[in-house]
Image (spheres, grey):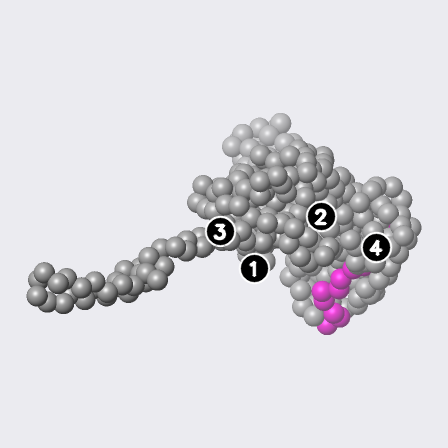
Amino acid sequence: MCASIIFDNKSNGMMVCFSLVFACLFLAGCHDAPQAREVRPVVKTMRLHMGTDAEERTYSGVVVARHEVQEAFRVDGRIARRLVDVGDHVRAGQVLASLDEKDLRLSMESAQAERRAAASNRAQALTDERRYATLLSRNAISHSEYDATRLAVDEATGRLERAERTLQLAENRLHYANLICSTDGVITRVSAEAGQVVAAGQSIVSVARDGALEVRVDIPERQIQNLQTMSAEVTLWSNMEAHYRAVLREISPTADPATRTYTVRYSLQGENPLVRLGMTANLRLTGPLGAPTARVPSSAVLDQGNGPGVWIVNPETGRLSFRFVTIERYTERGVHVHGELADGDIVVITGAHKLDQDMEVRLADMSQGVAR
């Protein structure tokens, strides 16, 4: 028993020392307090596979003609007839529409009358010039009088030439009353109807020239830089089994102000009898093979202010280390990265923002859903 009572007979008093307190302290010291165990968090991981997969993109577009002519009258007037509709195949030299010729014909007749008057005036001037030349040879008139008649002939000749040019222009304007097709092709758009008054140069019909076809697509501005290095292939929604090779021909110099996309045209190679204007097409772009990359979920990438990186787990010790990476591209299935990585590295794919350097973790078994 650790407690005792001590009597001191010399001090005429009884001192009682309750050693029970000291006994309790002694008993408490006989047992060591258990130390707290360090907690190692469980993390979800994946094993990296470095590869050189080619970059692929797919865009939706429409089949258009490479050359589309806006046919227009060269004179103004009221449309009397329109002889074609959308979808009609036309030939070069075919009449597409006609203007009312009444005013144009009157202008031509007026020019013809002016020419006849100018011709008569010149004939009279020539007669006078010959008569004055005879009189000059007989010294019946002075040289100044003869010079006046000769100048009158020159003036009449100029008026006749001007009248002839005016008549030619009037005849041309009358000829321009018929809108003549300039190329073989198909009508894609009609912009005016019979009875409408149109101005010179106003588009009446659009003709897609036969031959070269293209696929027109709209591509976002952040993906426009490396199109020249990517191969292109086109498939049609009407026939997904057929594949057509395409070549980049044109990139719009400016972006659409509403969508901020650039219009890009790819020329289809070879004869394609099944490809028709207006068909919906899928453009598939394949980029060249680049540096080896690994695809990880976007949740695995962490940027602590010094650049993006991922947490790598040492499989033997479970200790974390942060590796900086370069983001190659984003896809629907994750992020393609490369940098301080090796094939087979174990990377943490969730909760990256809650981890620290040199922290020890446990790996979660993806197939069983338990820690290992």
- Residue that carries the numbered disc 1 in the rendered image: 258
Q: Which image quadrant for residue 227?
A: top right
- Count neighbours of disc 4 (C-alpha within 10 A) and say few if under 14, some if 14 to 19, many if 20 or more: many
Numbered label attached to residue 326? none
- Residue 208 drawn at (x, y percent): 79, 53
Numbered label attached to residue 38? 3
| Residue closest to the eye, 205 or 148 | 205
Judged by depth in the image, the label closer to the viewer, 3 or 1, is: 3
Q: Determine if the magenta segment contains residue 190.
A: yes
Q: Which image quadrant for residue 52?
A: top right
Q: Earlier in the sequence, mark 3 or mark 1?
A: 3
- Residue that carries the numbered disc 2 in the rendered image: 57
- Residue that carries the numbered disc 4 in the rendered image: 236
Specify the farthest residue to the right: 273
Quadrant holding the N terminus = bottom left
Q: Secondary structure at mark 2?
A: strand
Give the distance between the C-alpha atoms of the residues marked 1 and 2, in whole angstroms.
23 Å
- Count neighbours of disc 2 (C-alpha within 10 A) and say few if under 14, some if 14 to 19, many if 20 or more: few
Taking 204 as reference, is 57 above or below it?
Answer: above
Q: Secondary structure at mark 3?
A: loop
Q: Determine if the magenta segment contains residue 67.
A: no
Judged by depth in the image, the label closer to the viewer, 1 or 2, is: 2
Q: Kindly tell me whether residue 122 is visible in this rendering.
A: no
Give the distance between the C-alpha atoms of the residues marked 2 and 4, in whole angstroms.
16 Å
Q: Amino acid at mark 4?
A: Leu
| Residue interval drawn in magenta | 184-195
- Residue 93 drawn at (x, y percent): 84, 51
